[in-house]
Image (cartoon, rainbow, N blue to C red):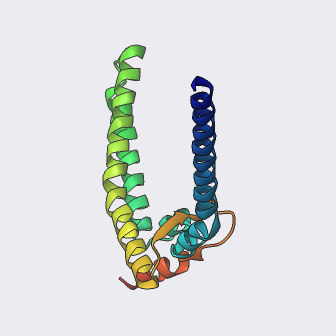
Amino acid sequence: MLKLEKKQVKMISIAIALIFIGSVVAIALTQTGTGIASAASSVNVGVIDRDQVLSQHPDGESVNTQMQAAITEVQKDFEEKSQGMTDQEKQDYYRQCQQRLAQKQQELAEPILKSVDDTIKKVADSKGLSVVIEKAAVVYGGTDITQDVLNKLTKK
């Protein structure tokens, strides 16, 4: 009787193992088939050359002019104030000047970046795009919205 129980245990174990393997294979087949293809086709992807948009932004020239004026002002200020300083004091003051310029650049660029991002969102929404990716990251495919964003920015 003891041998019969061992045989039954082996048969049950083999049956459970076969059911488990069959389940895994079935799940794998359903996931790799039409599931992925239908998910990919439901996502509309746009691409944009953000560097081109930023370089051709209508307010870009004004920001560049303001930044050049700030650089000139900081250079003049540094030359005047650093004359009696030691080398270490000059280095410290130079770092402070660089920080001021970086802060000024961020302050001037922030409105442009915001307007570009807002315009990208508007164009993407109007074209029914669910995702917009930097053009340099895309090897193939996607709807290029760079010119549409530029056109919308210049109309403002």
Q: Who is closer to the viewer here, 1 or 107?
A: 1
Is residue 153 at all visible to an observer of this figure?
no
Report which quarter residue 90 is drawn in: top left
Residue drawn 59% across and 37% down? 13
Residue 108, compared with residue 142, is above or below; it is above
Q: Who is closer to the viewer here, 72 or 51?
A: 51
Residue 17, compared with residue 44, is above or below; it is above
Residue 73, compared with residue 36, is above or below; it is above
Location of residue 150 in the rendering, given as x and y in whole percent from the top left corner: 48, 77
Residue drawn 53% across and 77% down? 145
Report which quarter residue 144 is drawn in: bottom right
Report which quarter residue 96 is drawn in: top left
Location of residue 79 in the rendering, given as x and y in whole percent from the top left corner: 39, 32
Quarter the C terminus occupies: bottom left
Is residue 148 at all visible to an observer of this figure?
yes
Residue drawn 47% across and 76% down? 129
Q: Who is closer to the viewer here, 9 or 55?
A: 9
Q: Relative to residue 150, is residue 138 drawn left or right?
A: right
Location of residue 5 in the rendering, given as x and y in whole percent from the top left corner: 57, 30
